[in-house]
Protein backbone atom coordinates (compact mmCIF):
# COMPACT_ATOMS: atom_id res chain seq x y z
CA UNK A 1 0.00 0.00 0.00
CA UNK A 2 2.84 2.39 0.86
CA UNK A 3 4.48 1.42 -2.43
CA UNK A 4 1.85 3.49 -4.25
CA UNK A 5 3.31 6.60 -2.68
CA UNK A 6 6.84 6.10 -4.02
CA UNK A 7 6.25 8.29 -7.13
CA UNK A 8 5.25 11.14 -4.79
CA UNK A 9 8.47 10.64 -2.87
CA UNK A 10 10.40 10.74 -6.14
CA UNK A 11 8.67 13.99 -7.15
CA UNK A 12 9.43 15.45 -3.74
CA UNK A 13 13.09 14.48 -4.01
CA UNK A 14 13.32 15.89 -7.53
CA UNK A 15 11.73 19.15 -6.47
CA UNK A 16 14.15 19.46 -3.57
CA UNK A 17 17.16 18.69 -5.77
CA UNK A 18 16.13 21.13 -8.50
CA UNK A 19 15.29 23.92 -6.06
CA UNK A 20 18.42 23.50 -3.98
CA UNK A 21 20.53 23.08 -7.11
CA UNK A 22 19.29 26.31 -8.68
CA UNK A 23 19.81 28.23 -5.46
CA UNK A 24 23.35 26.98 -5.05
CA UNK A 25 24.15 27.42 -8.74
CA UNK A 26 23.00 31.05 -8.90
CA UNK A 27 24.96 31.74 -5.80
CA UNK A 28 28.13 30.44 -7.45
CA UNK A 29 27.83 31.83 -10.99
CA UNK A 30 25.89 35.11 -10.49
CA UNK A 31 27.63 38.38 -11.46
CA UNK A 32 28.25 40.64 -8.47
CA UNK A 33 27.58 44.28 -9.30
CA UNK A 34 27.20 46.51 -6.28
CA UNK A 35 26.39 50.17 -6.73
CA UNK A 36 23.70 52.36 -5.14
CA UNK A 37 21.28 52.09 -8.05
CA UNK A 38 21.58 48.31 -8.18
CA UNK A 39 20.77 48.10 -4.50
CA UNK A 40 17.57 50.16 -4.57
CA UNK A 41 14.24 48.40 -4.12
CA UNK A 42 13.14 48.78 -7.75
CA UNK A 43 16.24 49.03 -9.88
CA UNK A 44 14.47 50.47 -12.93
CA UNK A 45 11.16 51.41 -11.38
CA UNK A 46 9.74 54.17 -9.20
CA UNK A 47 12.00 55.73 -6.60
CA UNK A 48 11.04 54.51 -3.11
CA UNK A 49 9.53 57.35 -1.11
CA UNK A 50 9.32 56.13 2.47
CA UNK A 51 9.24 53.05 4.67
CA UNK A 52 6.66 50.38 3.93
CA UNK A 53 5.72 50.05 7.62
CA UNK A 54 2.95 52.57 7.90
CA UNK A 55 0.34 52.94 10.57
CA UNK A 56 -3.03 52.55 8.99
CA UNK A 57 -6.46 52.49 10.56
CA UNK A 58 -7.56 49.30 12.27
CA UNK A 59 -10.87 49.78 10.44
CA UNK A 60 -9.33 47.96 7.50
CA UNK A 61 -9.11 44.80 9.55
CA UNK A 62 -12.63 45.18 10.85
CA UNK A 63 -14.02 45.68 7.36
CA UNK A 64 -12.03 42.77 5.98
CA UNK A 65 -13.21 40.56 8.82
CA UNK A 66 -16.84 41.50 8.32
CA UNK A 67 -16.54 40.89 4.60
CA UNK A 68 -15.13 37.41 5.17
CA UNK A 69 -17.82 36.67 7.75
CA UNK A 70 -20.75 37.54 5.52
CA UNK A 71 -19.04 36.11 2.46
CA UNK A 72 -18.56 32.71 4.07
CA UNK A 73 -22.05 32.70 5.52
CA UNK A 74 -23.61 33.48 2.15
CA UNK A 75 -21.53 30.72 0.54
CA UNK A 76 -23.55 28.29 2.67
CA UNK A 77 -26.60 29.19 0.63
CA UNK A 78 -25.21 27.71 -2.59
CA UNK A 79 -25.16 24.06 -1.54
CA UNK A 80 -28.49 24.68 0.15
CA UNK A 81 -30.00 26.01 -3.07
CA UNK A 82 -28.67 23.04 -5.04
CA UNK A 83 -30.39 20.43 -2.88
CA UNK A 84 -33.39 22.56 -1.96
CA UNK A 85 -35.96 21.01 -4.31
CA UNK A 86 -34.84 17.49 -3.58
CA UNK A 87 -35.36 17.94 0.15
CA UNK A 88 -38.51 20.00 -0.13
CA UNK A 89 -40.38 16.82 -0.95
CA UNK A 90 -39.72 15.70 2.62
CA UNK A 91 -41.30 18.72 4.20
CA UNK A 92 -40.61 22.34 4.93
CA UNK A 93 -37.77 21.66 7.30
CA UNK A 94 -35.08 22.71 4.84
CA UNK A 95 -36.87 25.99 4.23
CA UNK A 96 -37.21 26.92 7.90
CA UNK A 97 -33.66 25.82 8.57
CA UNK A 98 -32.34 28.46 6.20
CA UNK A 99 -34.78 31.06 7.52
CA UNK A 100 -33.41 30.51 11.03
CA UNK A 101 -29.87 30.67 9.73
CA UNK A 102 -30.58 33.94 7.94
CA UNK A 103 -32.35 35.34 11.00
CA UNK A 104 -29.24 34.73 13.11
CA UNK A 105 -27.11 36.26 10.37
CA UNK A 106 -29.42 39.26 10.19
CA UNK A 107 -29.26 39.68 13.97
CA UNK A 108 -25.51 39.88 13.62
CA UNK A 109 -25.90 42.45 10.87
CA UNK A 110 -28.19 44.61 13.01
CA UNK A 111 -25.76 44.36 15.88
CA UNK A 112 -22.85 45.46 13.70
CA UNK A 113 -24.86 48.33 12.20
CA UNK A 114 -25.99 49.70 15.54
CA UNK A 115 -22.60 49.23 17.12
CA UNK A 116 -21.06 51.38 14.39
CA UNK A 117 -19.21 48.62 12.61
CA UNK A 118 -19.89 50.17 9.21
CA UNK A 119 -18.95 53.75 10.09
CA UNK A 120 -15.57 54.81 8.88
CA UNK A 121 -15.05 57.73 11.23
CA UNK B 1 -30.52 11.06 1.44
CA UNK B 2 -32.91 11.39 4.25
CA UNK B 3 -33.22 13.86 7.05
CA UNK B 4 -35.53 12.67 9.73
CA UNK B 5 -35.38 14.97 12.68
CA UNK B 6 -37.94 14.30 15.35
CA UNK B 7 -38.94 16.20 18.42
CA UNK B 8 -36.63 14.01 20.48
CA UNK B 9 -33.66 15.36 18.54
CA UNK B 10 -34.52 18.91 19.44
CA UNK B 11 -35.47 18.03 23.00
CA UNK B 12 -31.96 16.66 23.45
CA UNK B 13 -30.42 20.05 22.79
CA UNK B 14 -33.24 22.15 24.25
CA UNK B 15 -31.00 23.90 26.82
CA UNK B 16 -28.56 24.70 24.02
CA UNK B 17 -31.31 26.09 21.80
CA UNK B 18 -32.72 28.23 24.60
CA UNK B 19 -29.33 29.65 25.50
CA UNK B 20 -28.38 30.35 21.87
CA UNK B 21 -31.72 32.11 21.36
CA UNK B 22 -31.16 34.23 24.44
CA UNK B 23 -27.65 35.02 23.26
CA UNK B 24 -28.82 36.28 19.86
CA UNK B 25 -31.74 38.25 21.27
CA UNK B 26 -29.65 39.85 24.01
CA UNK B 27 -26.98 40.78 21.48
CA UNK B 28 -29.53 42.70 19.41
CA UNK B 29 -31.23 44.09 22.50
CA UNK B 30 -27.99 45.38 23.95
CA UNK B 31 -27.31 47.68 21.00
CA UNK B 32 -30.83 49.10 21.01
CA UNK B 33 -31.13 49.92 24.69
CA UNK B 34 -30.04 52.98 26.58
CA UNK B 35 -27.30 52.93 29.13
CA UNK B 36 -29.65 52.32 32.03
CA UNK B 37 -31.32 49.33 30.41
CA UNK B 38 -27.98 47.77 29.57
CA UNK B 39 -27.56 47.15 33.27
CA UNK B 40 -30.47 44.71 33.11
CA UNK B 41 -28.94 42.58 30.36
CA UNK B 42 -26.82 40.39 32.66
CA UNK B 43 -30.00 39.71 34.65
CA UNK B 44 -31.83 38.76 31.45
CA UNK B 45 -28.93 36.42 30.75
CA UNK B 46 -29.48 34.85 34.17
CA UNK B 47 -33.15 34.40 33.26
CA UNK B 48 -32.08 32.58 30.09
CA UNK B 49 -29.77 30.35 32.10
CA UNK B 50 -32.56 29.54 34.56
CA UNK B 51 -34.89 28.64 31.67
CA UNK B 52 -32.17 26.41 30.23
CA UNK B 53 -31.73 24.79 33.65
CA UNK B 54 -35.47 24.10 33.80
CA UNK B 55 -35.43 22.61 30.30
CA UNK B 56 -32.49 20.48 31.41
CA UNK B 57 -34.86 18.69 33.81
CA UNK B 58 -36.81 17.32 30.83
CA UNK B 59 -33.70 15.36 29.85
CA UNK B 60 -33.42 13.52 33.15
CA UNK B 61 -33.75 9.78 32.75
CA UNK B 62 -33.38 9.91 28.97
CA UNK B 63 -30.73 7.90 27.18
CA UNK B 64 -30.57 8.12 23.40
CA UNK B 65 -28.57 9.42 20.46
CA UNK B 66 -29.84 12.43 18.56
CA UNK B 67 -29.01 14.16 15.28
CA UNK B 68 -27.72 11.11 13.39
CA UNK B 69 -25.61 9.94 16.35
CA UNK B 70 -23.92 13.30 16.78
CA UNK B 71 -25.42 14.16 20.15
CA UNK B 72 -25.72 11.90 23.13
CA UNK B 73 -28.43 12.51 25.69
CA UNK B 74 -27.82 10.65 28.93
CA UNK B 75 -27.40 11.38 32.60
CA UNK B 76 -23.87 12.63 31.97
CA UNK B 77 -25.21 15.21 29.50
CA UNK B 78 -27.70 16.39 32.11
CA UNK B 79 -25.04 16.55 34.80
CA UNK B 80 -22.58 18.46 32.62
CA UNK B 81 -25.29 20.85 31.40
CA UNK B 82 -26.10 21.51 35.03
CA UNK B 83 -22.47 22.26 35.92
CA UNK B 84 -21.97 24.56 32.93
CA UNK B 85 -25.24 26.44 33.45
CA UNK B 86 -24.64 26.99 37.15
CA UNK B 87 -21.11 28.19 36.42
CA UNK B 88 -22.38 30.58 33.77
CA UNK B 89 -25.17 31.88 35.99
CA UNK B 90 -22.91 32.55 38.96
CA UNK B 91 -20.25 34.16 36.75
CA UNK B 92 -22.89 36.43 35.25
CA UNK B 93 -23.92 37.48 38.74
CA UNK B 94 -20.30 38.42 39.36
CA UNK B 95 -20.35 40.76 36.35
CA UNK B 96 -23.41 42.70 37.45
CA UNK B 97 -21.36 45.24 39.36
CA UNK B 98 -18.24 44.86 37.31
CA UNK B 99 -18.87 47.24 34.42
CA UNK B 100 -19.39 50.26 36.67
CA UNK B 101 -16.41 49.32 38.76
CA UNK B 102 -14.15 49.06 35.74
CA UNK B 103 -15.52 51.95 33.67
CA UNK B 104 -15.71 49.86 30.56
CA UNK B 105 -18.60 48.97 28.34
CA UNK B 106 -19.70 45.43 28.89
CA UNK B 107 -22.28 45.34 26.11
CA UNK B 108 -21.22 42.10 24.45
CA UNK B 109 -20.29 40.35 27.63
CA UNK B 110 -23.55 38.56 28.42
CA UNK B 111 -24.15 37.21 24.88
CA UNK B 112 -20.54 36.04 24.66
CA UNK B 113 -20.82 34.24 27.96
CA UNK B 114 -24.03 32.55 26.83
CA UNK B 115 -22.46 31.46 23.53
CA UNK B 116 -19.44 30.15 25.36
CA UNK B 117 -21.72 28.11 27.62
CA UNK B 118 -23.46 26.75 24.52
CA UNK B 119 -20.07 25.51 23.33
CA UNK B 120 -19.43 23.83 26.67
CA UNK B 121 -22.80 22.10 26.57
CA UNK B 122 -22.09 20.88 23.03
CA UNK B 123 -18.87 19.33 24.34
CA UNK B 124 -20.71 17.73 27.23
CA UNK B 125 -23.26 16.09 24.96
CA UNK B 126 -20.93 15.17 22.11
CA UNK B 127 -20.99 11.68 20.64
CA UNK B 128 -18.59 12.58 17.86
CA UNK B 129 -15.13 14.10 17.77
CA UNK B 130 -16.38 16.77 15.36
CA UNK B 131 -18.97 17.82 17.94
CA UNK B 132 -16.20 18.07 20.52
CA UNK B 133 -14.26 20.28 18.13
CA UNK B 134 -17.30 22.43 17.34
CA UNK B 135 -18.11 22.90 21.01
CA UNK B 136 -14.50 23.57 21.92
CA UNK B 137 -14.22 26.31 19.31
CA UNK B 138 -17.55 27.91 20.20
CA UNK B 139 -16.43 27.98 23.80
CA UNK B 140 -12.88 29.13 23.14
CA UNK B 141 -13.51 31.90 20.63
CA UNK B 142 -15.93 33.56 23.00
CA UNK B 143 -13.43 33.12 25.84
CA UNK B 144 -10.60 34.71 23.83
CA UNK B 145 -12.70 37.85 23.44
CA UNK B 146 -13.84 37.82 27.05
CA UNK B 147 -10.24 37.54 28.28
CA UNK B 148 -9.47 40.87 26.61
CA UNK B 149 -12.45 42.78 27.94
CA UNK B 150 -10.45 45.19 30.07
CA UNK B 151 -9.15 46.65 26.88
CA UNK B 152 -7.56 49.67 28.55
CA UNK B 153 -5.29 47.34 30.50
CA UNK B 154 -2.12 45.92 29.03
CA UNK B 155 -2.35 42.65 30.96
CA UNK B 156 -5.83 41.95 29.71
CA UNK B 157 -4.80 42.41 26.09
CA UNK B 158 -1.76 40.24 26.70
CA UNK B 159 -4.01 37.60 28.22
CA UNK B 160 -6.37 37.65 25.23
CA UNK B 161 -3.58 37.46 22.66
CA UNK B 162 -1.68 34.78 24.52
CA UNK B 163 -4.78 32.70 25.04
CA UNK B 164 -5.81 33.10 21.41
CA UNK B 165 -2.45 32.22 19.86
CA UNK B 166 -1.69 29.29 22.13
CA UNK B 167 -5.31 28.14 22.04
CA UNK B 168 -5.36 28.16 18.25
CA UNK B 169 -2.11 26.17 18.27
CA UNK B 170 -3.56 23.62 20.71
CA UNK B 171 -6.68 23.34 18.58
CA UNK B 172 -4.38 22.47 15.69
CA UNK B 173 -3.05 19.51 17.69
CA UNK B 174 -6.58 18.44 18.51
CA UNK B 175 -7.68 18.60 14.87
CA UNK B 176 -4.64 16.69 13.69
CA UNK B 177 -5.37 14.02 16.26
CA UNK B 178 -8.97 13.82 15.05
CA UNK B 179 -7.72 13.54 11.46
CA UNK B 180 -5.41 10.63 12.32
CA UNK B 181 -8.16 8.83 14.22
CA UNK B 182 -10.51 9.37 11.30
CA UNK B 183 -7.85 7.98 9.00
CA UNK B 184 -7.68 4.76 10.99
CA UNK B 185 -11.31 4.25 11.99
CA UNK B 186 -13.00 5.83 8.99
CA UNK B 187 -15.34 7.78 11.24
CA UNK B 188 -15.16 10.36 13.98
CA UNK B 189 -18.12 8.94 15.85
CA UNK B 190 -17.47 7.62 19.35
CA UNK B 191 -19.67 4.64 18.55
CA UNK B 192 -17.49 3.72 15.59
CA UNK B 193 -14.30 4.31 17.57
CA UNK B 194 -15.52 2.02 20.35
CA UNK B 195 -16.42 -0.65 17.77
CA UNK B 196 -13.01 -0.37 16.14
CA UNK B 197 -11.28 -0.71 19.50
CA UNK B 198 -13.43 -3.69 20.44
CA UNK B 199 -12.03 -5.49 17.42
CA UNK B 200 -8.45 -4.24 17.70
CA UNK B 201 -8.04 -3.77 21.44
CA UNK B 202 -4.69 -5.53 21.59
CA UNK B 203 -3.13 -4.14 18.44
CA UNK B 204 -4.57 -0.74 17.59
CA UNK B 205 -3.05 1.02 14.62
CA UNK B 206 -0.01 3.11 15.52
CA UNK B 207 -1.64 6.15 13.90
CA UNK B 208 -4.62 5.74 16.21
CA UNK B 209 -2.32 5.92 19.21
CA UNK B 210 -0.56 8.97 17.81
CA UNK B 211 -3.97 10.57 17.28
CA UNK B 212 -4.93 9.75 20.85
CA UNK B 213 -1.70 11.35 22.03
CA UNK B 214 -2.48 14.51 20.09
CA UNK B 215 -5.95 14.58 21.65
CA UNK B 216 -4.26 14.49 25.07
CA UNK B 217 -2.29 17.58 24.01
CA UNK B 218 -5.41 19.37 22.77
CA UNK B 219 -7.54 18.62 25.82
CA UNK B 220 -4.55 19.02 28.13
CA UNK B 221 -4.17 22.59 26.98
CA UNK B 222 -7.78 23.43 27.70
CA UNK B 223 -7.74 21.97 31.20
CA UNK B 224 -4.18 23.25 31.86
CA UNK B 225 -2.26 20.05 32.42
CA UNK B 226 1.48 20.35 32.90
CA UNK B 227 3.37 20.70 30.51
CA UNK B 228 0.61 22.50 28.58
CA UNK B 229 -0.13 24.94 31.39
CA UNK B 230 2.19 27.85 30.51
CA UNK B 231 -0.63 30.16 29.47
CA UNK B 232 -2.69 29.69 32.62
CA UNK B 233 -1.17 32.15 35.14
CA UNK B 234 -0.85 35.03 32.69
CA UNK B 235 -4.28 34.57 31.17
CA UNK B 236 -5.97 34.12 34.55
CA UNK B 237 -4.24 37.19 35.91
CA UNK B 238 -4.93 39.44 32.94
CA UNK B 239 -8.56 38.52 32.35
CA UNK B 240 -11.34 40.36 34.17
CA UNK B 241 -12.06 38.57 37.43
CA UNK B 242 -15.54 37.21 36.49
CA UNK B 243 -14.05 35.83 33.26
CA UNK B 244 -11.21 34.21 35.19
CA UNK B 245 -13.73 32.54 37.46
CA UNK B 246 -15.81 31.39 34.51
CA UNK B 247 -12.78 30.18 32.58
CA UNK B 248 -11.23 28.39 35.55
CA UNK B 249 -14.39 26.43 36.26
CA UNK B 250 -16.31 26.19 32.99
CA UNK B 251 -13.52 25.60 30.50
CA UNK B 252 -11.94 23.04 32.81
CA UNK B 253 -15.23 21.19 33.28
CA UNK B 254 -15.78 21.23 29.50
CA UNK B 255 -12.29 19.86 28.89
CA UNK B 256 -12.94 17.07 31.36
CA UNK B 257 -16.30 16.43 29.70
CA UNK B 258 -14.39 15.76 26.48
CA UNK B 259 -11.79 13.65 28.28
CA UNK B 260 -14.47 11.55 29.98
CA UNK B 261 -16.43 11.15 26.75
CA UNK B 262 -13.42 10.08 24.75
CA UNK B 263 -10.99 8.32 27.08
CA UNK B 264 -13.19 6.84 29.79
CA UNK B 265 -16.26 6.01 27.73
CA UNK B 266 -15.00 5.39 24.17
CA UNK B 267 -11.34 4.40 24.35
CA UNK B 268 -11.55 2.31 27.52
CA UNK B 269 -10.48 -0.76 25.52
CA UNK B 270 -7.00 0.66 25.05
CA UNK B 271 -6.74 2.14 28.53
CA UNK B 272 -3.51 0.20 28.99
CA UNK B 273 -2.01 2.46 26.31
CA UNK B 274 -2.98 5.88 27.69
CA UNK B 275 -3.22 5.28 31.44
CA UNK B 276 0.55 5.47 31.95
CA UNK B 277 0.79 8.73 30.02
CA UNK B 278 -2.00 10.29 32.04
CA UNK B 279 -0.47 8.91 35.24
CA UNK B 280 2.72 10.86 34.57
CA UNK B 281 0.77 13.97 33.53
CA UNK B 282 -1.34 13.76 36.70
CA UNK B 283 1.72 13.60 38.95
CA UNK B 284 3.44 16.42 37.06
CA UNK B 285 0.32 18.59 37.04
CA UNK B 286 -0.38 18.20 40.76
CA UNK B 287 3.22 18.76 41.79
CA UNK B 288 4.11 21.67 39.52
CA UNK B 289 0.80 23.41 40.21
CA UNK B 290 1.10 23.14 43.97
CA UNK B 291 4.80 23.94 44.23
CA UNK B 292 4.55 27.03 42.03
CA UNK B 293 1.45 28.21 43.89
CA UNK B 294 3.54 28.33 47.08
CA UNK B 295 5.47 31.39 45.96
CA UNK B 296 2.63 33.43 44.45
CA UNK B 297 1.94 36.89 45.83
CA UNK B 298 -1.12 37.59 43.70
CA UNK B 299 -4.45 35.94 44.54
CA UNK B 300 -5.33 35.46 40.86
CA UNK B 301 -2.02 33.82 40.03
CA UNK B 302 -2.26 31.72 43.16
CA UNK B 303 -5.72 30.51 42.16
CA UNK B 304 -4.42 29.91 38.62
CA UNK B 305 -1.71 27.56 39.87
CA UNK B 306 -4.19 26.01 42.26
CA UNK B 307 -6.50 25.37 39.30
CA UNK B 308 -3.63 23.58 37.55
CA UNK B 309 -3.17 21.42 40.63
CA UNK B 310 -6.89 20.65 40.73
CA UNK B 311 -6.74 19.52 37.09
CA UNK B 312 -4.12 17.07 38.31
CA UNK B 313 -6.40 15.73 41.04
CA UNK B 314 -9.18 15.31 38.48
CA UNK B 315 -6.82 13.44 36.22
CA UNK B 316 -6.15 10.98 39.06
CA UNK B 317 -9.80 9.99 38.75
CA UNK B 318 -9.45 9.51 34.99
CA UNK B 319 -6.32 7.39 35.46
CA UNK B 320 -8.16 5.14 37.93
CA UNK B 321 -10.41 4.10 35.00
CA UNK B 322 -12.96 2.05 36.90
CA UNK B 323 -16.63 2.30 37.81
CA UNK B 324 -15.86 5.06 40.30
CA UNK B 325 -14.13 7.30 37.76
CA UNK B 326 -17.08 9.15 36.32
CA UNK B 327 -18.96 9.71 39.62
CA UNK B 328 -15.75 10.84 41.35
CA UNK B 329 -14.81 13.25 38.56
CA UNK B 330 -18.35 14.66 38.38
CA UNK B 331 -18.46 15.13 42.15
CA UNK B 332 -15.11 16.86 42.16
CA UNK B 333 -16.15 19.16 39.31
CA UNK B 334 -19.13 20.30 41.38
CA UNK B 335 -16.85 20.75 44.40
CA UNK B 336 -14.35 22.70 42.32
CA UNK B 337 -17.17 24.86 40.91
CA UNK B 338 -18.45 25.85 44.35
CA UNK B 339 -15.16 26.54 46.10
CA UNK B 340 -13.47 28.24 43.18
CA UNK B 341 -16.38 30.54 42.31
CA UNK B 342 -16.68 31.43 45.99
CA UNK B 343 -12.98 32.25 46.21
CA UNK B 344 -13.06 34.33 43.03
CA UNK B 345 -16.17 36.20 44.14
CA UNK B 346 -14.46 37.26 47.37
CA UNK B 347 -11.25 38.08 45.51
CA UNK B 348 -13.38 40.26 43.23
CA UNK B 349 -14.81 42.14 46.21
CA UNK B 350 -11.39 42.64 47.77
CA UNK B 351 -9.69 43.62 44.51
CA UNK B 352 -11.87 46.72 44.37
CA UNK B 353 -11.73 49.46 41.78
CA UNK B 354 -9.87 48.58 38.55
CA UNK B 355 -8.68 45.35 40.19
CA UNK B 356 -5.77 47.18 41.75
CA UNK B 357 -5.78 45.18 44.97
CA UNK B 358 -5.24 41.61 43.82
CA UNK B 359 -2.14 40.96 45.90
CA UNK B 360 -2.66 38.60 48.80
CA UNK B 361 -1.45 41.25 51.26
CA UNK B 362 -4.71 43.13 50.68
CA UNK B 363 -6.50 40.30 52.44
CA UNK B 364 -4.75 41.31 55.66
CA UNK B 365 -7.15 42.22 58.40
CA UNK B 366 -10.25 41.30 56.44
CA UNK B 367 -11.50 39.52 59.54
CA UNK B 368 -11.71 42.90 61.30
CA UNK B 369 -13.29 44.95 58.55
CA UNK B 370 -15.59 42.30 57.05
CA UNK B 371 -15.81 39.27 59.38
CA UNK B 372 -18.47 37.42 57.38
CA UNK B 373 -16.52 37.81 54.16
CA UNK B 374 -13.33 36.61 55.83
CA UNK B 375 -15.18 33.61 57.22
CA UNK B 376 -16.54 32.76 53.75
CA UNK B 377 -13.06 33.07 52.22
CA UNK B 378 -11.61 30.89 54.98
CA UNK B 379 -14.26 28.25 54.23
CA UNK B 380 -13.45 28.31 50.51
CA UNK B 381 -9.71 28.06 51.20
CA UNK B 382 -10.16 25.20 53.67
CA UNK B 383 -12.33 23.41 51.14
CA UNK B 384 -9.77 23.95 48.36
CA UNK B 385 -7.10 22.54 50.66
CA UNK B 386 -9.35 19.54 51.26
CA UNK B 387 -10.26 19.54 54.96
CA UNK B 388 -13.40 17.88 56.29
CA UNK B 389 -16.28 18.61 56.62
CA UNK B 390 -16.17 20.49 53.33
CA UNK B 391 -16.99 19.34 49.82
CA UNK B 392 -13.32 19.65 48.86
CA UNK B 393 -12.47 16.84 51.27
CA UNK B 394 -15.21 14.55 50.01
CA UNK B 395 -14.24 15.24 46.39
CA UNK B 396 -10.62 14.32 47.01
CA UNK B 397 -11.73 11.31 49.05
CA UNK B 398 -13.76 9.97 46.11
CA UNK B 399 -10.98 10.65 43.58
CA UNK B 400 -8.22 9.05 45.61
CA UNK B 401 -10.35 6.10 46.65
CA UNK B 402 -11.11 5.52 42.96
CA UNK B 403 -7.34 5.43 42.36
CA UNK B 404 -6.81 3.04 45.29
CA UNK B 405 -9.62 0.82 44.04
CA UNK B 406 -7.64 0.32 40.83
CA UNK B 407 -4.42 -0.29 42.73
CA UNK B 408 -2.72 3.05 42.09
CA UNK B 409 -1.45 3.34 45.66
CA UNK B 410 1.47 5.57 44.76
CA UNK B 411 -0.68 7.93 42.77
CA UNK B 412 -3.00 8.33 45.74
CA UNK B 413 -0.04 8.90 48.07
CA UNK B 414 1.42 11.56 45.76
CA UNK B 415 -2.02 13.16 45.60
CA UNK B 416 -2.30 13.29 49.38
CA UNK B 417 1.23 14.71 49.73
CA UNK B 418 0.27 17.38 47.19
CA UNK B 419 -2.85 18.21 49.18
CA UNK B 420 -0.61 18.74 52.19
CA UNK B 421 1.68 21.06 50.22
CA UNK B 422 -1.35 23.04 49.08
CA UNK B 423 -2.42 23.64 52.68
CA UNK B 424 0.47 26.07 53.07
CA UNK B 425 -0.66 28.60 50.50
CA UNK B 426 -4.39 28.24 51.11
CA UNK B 427 -3.93 28.74 54.82
CA UNK B 428 -1.58 31.65 54.03
CA UNK B 429 -4.63 33.62 52.91
CA UNK B 430 -6.50 32.69 56.09
CA UNK B 431 -3.52 33.75 58.21
CA UNK B 432 -3.37 37.07 56.38
CA UNK B 433 -7.06 37.68 57.06
CA UNK B 434 -7.11 36.69 60.72
CA UNK B 435 -3.65 37.40 62.12
CA UNK B 436 -2.61 40.65 60.49
CA UNK B 437 -3.64 44.28 60.77
CA UNK B 438 -5.38 45.78 57.73
CA UNK B 439 -3.12 47.54 55.22
CA UNK B 440 -5.61 50.37 54.87
CA UNK B 441 -7.58 50.85 58.08
CA UNK B 442 -10.30 53.05 56.64
CA UNK B 443 -11.20 50.77 53.77
CA UNK B 444 -14.27 48.57 54.16
CA UNK B 445 -15.07 46.26 51.28
CA UNK B 446 -18.47 46.76 49.72
CA UNK B 447 -20.53 43.67 48.91
CA UNK B 448 -23.02 44.08 46.09
CA UNK B 449 -26.05 41.75 46.14
CA UNK B 450 -25.13 39.71 43.04
CA UNK B 451 -21.62 38.91 44.23
CA UNK B 452 -22.86 38.29 47.76
CA UNK B 453 -25.33 35.75 46.41
CA UNK B 454 -22.52 33.86 44.69
CA UNK B 455 -20.55 33.73 47.95
CA UNK B 456 -23.61 32.52 49.80
CA UNK B 457 -24.37 29.77 47.28
CA UNK B 458 -20.75 28.65 47.37
CA UNK B 459 -20.51 28.49 51.16
CA UNK B 460 -23.86 26.75 51.60
CA UNK B 461 -22.99 24.27 48.85
CA UNK B 462 -19.57 23.56 50.33
CA UNK B 463 -21.14 22.60 53.65
CA UNK B 464 -24.28 20.82 52.47
CA UNK B 465 -22.44 18.54 50.05
CA UNK B 466 -19.50 18.27 52.41
CA UNK B 467 -21.62 16.96 55.27
CA UNK B 468 -24.16 15.06 53.16
CA UNK B 469 -22.07 14.00 50.14
CA UNK B 470 -24.46 11.15 49.44
CA UNK B 471 -27.15 13.57 48.30
CA UNK B 472 -24.93 14.63 45.40
CA UNK B 473 -22.91 11.47 44.82
CA UNK B 474 -26.16 9.49 44.66
CA UNK B 475 -27.14 11.44 41.53
CA UNK B 476 -23.91 10.40 39.83
CA UNK B 477 -24.43 6.72 40.57
Image (cartoon, rainbow, N blue to C red):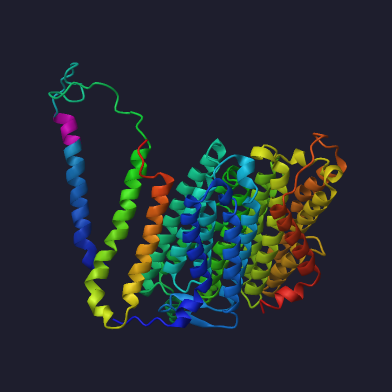
At 56% from the left and 41% from the top, the residue drawn is B104
Magenta stretch, overall SS: helix
Q: Quadrant of the C terminus of chain B?
A: bottom right
At 50% from the left and 83% from the top, the residue drawn is B64
Tell me residue B115's x, y (percent).
50, 60
Residue B185 magenta: no
- A116 sits to left or right of B383: left
Tell me residue B264's x, y (percent).
56, 73
- B281 sits to left or right of A82: right
Could you say which is closer to the camera, residue B276 or residue B326? Answer: B326
The single residue placed furthest to the top in the displayed view is A36
At 57% from the left and 51% from the top, the residue drawn is B37
Could you say which is closer to the camera, residue B189 or residue A14? Answer: B189
Query: What count of labels does the image hold?
Result: 0
At 70% from the left and 51% from the top, the residue drawn is B345
Relative vertical location of residue A12 with respect to residue A59 in this rendering, above or below: below
Q: Quadrant of residue B324?
A: bottom right
Tell me residue B30's x, y (percent).
50, 52
- A64 sits to left or right of A20: right
Relative vertical location of residue A95 with respect to residue B295 in this rendering, above or below: below
Residue B146 in sight: yes
Part of the protein shown in magenta: A24-29
Q: Quadrant of the N terminus of chain B?
A: bottom left
Tell me residue B471's x, y (percent).
74, 75
Residue B230 in sight: no
Amino acid sequence: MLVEYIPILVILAMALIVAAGILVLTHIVNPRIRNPIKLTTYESGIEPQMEARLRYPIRFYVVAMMFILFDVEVIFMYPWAVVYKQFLSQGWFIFWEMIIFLAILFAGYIYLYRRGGFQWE
Amino acid sequence: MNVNLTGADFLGILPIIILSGFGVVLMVLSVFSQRFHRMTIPYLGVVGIILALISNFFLIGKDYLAFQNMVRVDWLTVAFNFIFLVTAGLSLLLTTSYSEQEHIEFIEFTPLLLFSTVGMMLMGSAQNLMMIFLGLETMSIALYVMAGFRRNHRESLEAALKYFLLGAFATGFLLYGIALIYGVVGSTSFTAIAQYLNKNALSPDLLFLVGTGLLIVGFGFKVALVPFHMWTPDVYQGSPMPVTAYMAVGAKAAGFAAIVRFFTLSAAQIAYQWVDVLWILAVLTMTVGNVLALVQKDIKRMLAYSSIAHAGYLLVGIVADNDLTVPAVMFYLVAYLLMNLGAFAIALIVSGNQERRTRIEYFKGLAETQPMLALAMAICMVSLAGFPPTIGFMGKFYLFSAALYSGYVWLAIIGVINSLISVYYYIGVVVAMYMHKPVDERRIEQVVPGVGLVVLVAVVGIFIFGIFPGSLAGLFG
